[in-house]
Amino acid sequence: MHVAVTGANGFVGRHLLARLAGRHQVRAIVSERPGAERELPNGGAGVDVRRSDVRRAETLRGAFDDVDAVVHTVAVPTERAQRFAEVNVAGVAHVVAEARRAGVRRLVHMSALGADPASPYPYLRSKGEGQSLVTGSGIPHVVLRSSLLFGEGDDFFPRLRISLLFPIVPVPGDGKARFQPVHVDDIAQALVAALERAEISGPHEVGGPDPVSYDEMLEEAMRGLHKRRMTVHVPVPLMKAPAFLMGLVMPDPPVTVQQLDLLAVDNTPKPNAMEPVFGIRPRPFRGALGYLRGR
Ligand SMILES: NC(=O)c1ccc[n+]([C@@H]2O[C@H](COP(=O)([O-])OP(=O)(O)OC[C@H]3O[C@@H](n4cnc5c(N)ncnc54)[C@H](OP(=O)(O)O)[C@@H]3O)[C@@H](O)[C@H]2O)c1
């Protein structure tokens, strides 16, 4: 199969390319950021590399010509240089339009648990609108609605490490919101199954094997880093002012005001399609964060 992967140099994209290597012909689509192609596995050796900015439809023109299937992973989790509406919504519309024009036969889309056009949270609303564009595209599709991802190179758990710099670690809300972290390579394998197995279709919720609370995730980060800290639960509204100030002075703050809201919302798949649909037994999260020490 000839497969195009958008966001190919991203966290999911890199792991997916590693899984596709030697199995399918790959077109790696990276952003227009200089040097993005050097972040591909093996520096992009063995894959056809293209550049596009999904916000601008014309940069996608021809990107899917001669391609059987597209995996779309591009999204932004926070609004900094780019807006949710431009990337997570219009970007998906441009990918769908180009896939339709090129006659792509299968579209696999990375969505997120809680993605819903009616969500009160702007990120999840934009992911929901993007997902609806895929499910309404008329192109045979699979959507992975994923819980939080972990693994070497993730962007979330190293941020917990920053919070451990404080002698007493502030925890947003009651710390009881539940997540089901899933290893990025398990997601890469599920994406490959979504590409290869025609009987899989539509949206599926996916996560790791066990639900864990935010408090337990913090415990795991401490265990991975061999650090012990006391924690204090702080109501989310009280943490918004410091998060807002960090956003003013730091180019990449550990947490944004919008993310604080999401940390207090349950993020578990109902039901978890990893094993029954994709045939993948997800690896455990507990004891898996030792890679944080090497950062
Ligand atoms: N990570 C998680 O915990 C998680 C959980 C649930 C769902 N998801 C979903 O999984 C998908 C992949 O996430 P990820 O963690 O791999 O994200 P990531 O590491 O941030 O990768 C995103 C990719 O999109 C590219 N990109 C950003 N803006 C672009 C634009 N305007 N045009 C073209 N490319 C652009 C980035 O390029 P640059 O490198 O140049 O920025 C990067 O290659 C997303 O759809 C996300 O919503 C992720």
Image (cartoon, grey):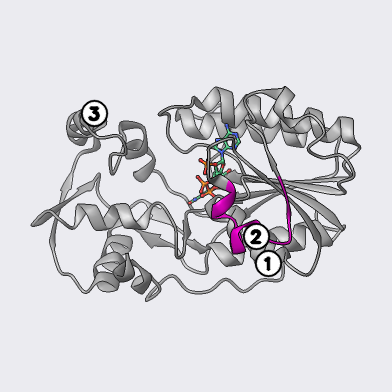
Find the magenta span and give its range: 37-49
The mark that comes first in sequence, 2 or 3, is 2
Q: Which mark is residue 244?
A: 3
Position of the C terminus by quadrant: bottom left
Mark 3: amino acid: Phe
Residue 19, numbered circle = 1
Measure the C-alpha gap from mark 2 to mark 3: 35 Å
| Amino acid type of the residue tagged 2 in the rendering | Leu
Q: Is residue 277 visible from the viewing direction of this image?
A: no
What amino acid is found at the position of numbered circle 1 in the picture? Answer: Arg
Residue 15 screen position, x and y as percent: 60, 61
Q: Earlier in the sequence, mark 1 or mark 3?
A: 1
Kindly indicate the quadrant of the structure image that contains residue 261.
top left
Contact flag, marks 1 and 2 (Cβ < 8 Å): yes
> Few, some or many C-alpha atoms within 10 Å of disc 3 (few <14, some 14-19, many ≥20)?
some
Q: Secondary structure at mark 2?
A: helix
The residue sitting at 61% across, 45% down in the picture is: 7
Q: Is residue 254 above or below residue 281?
A: above
Answer with the quarter of the image where residue 135 lies.
Answer: top right
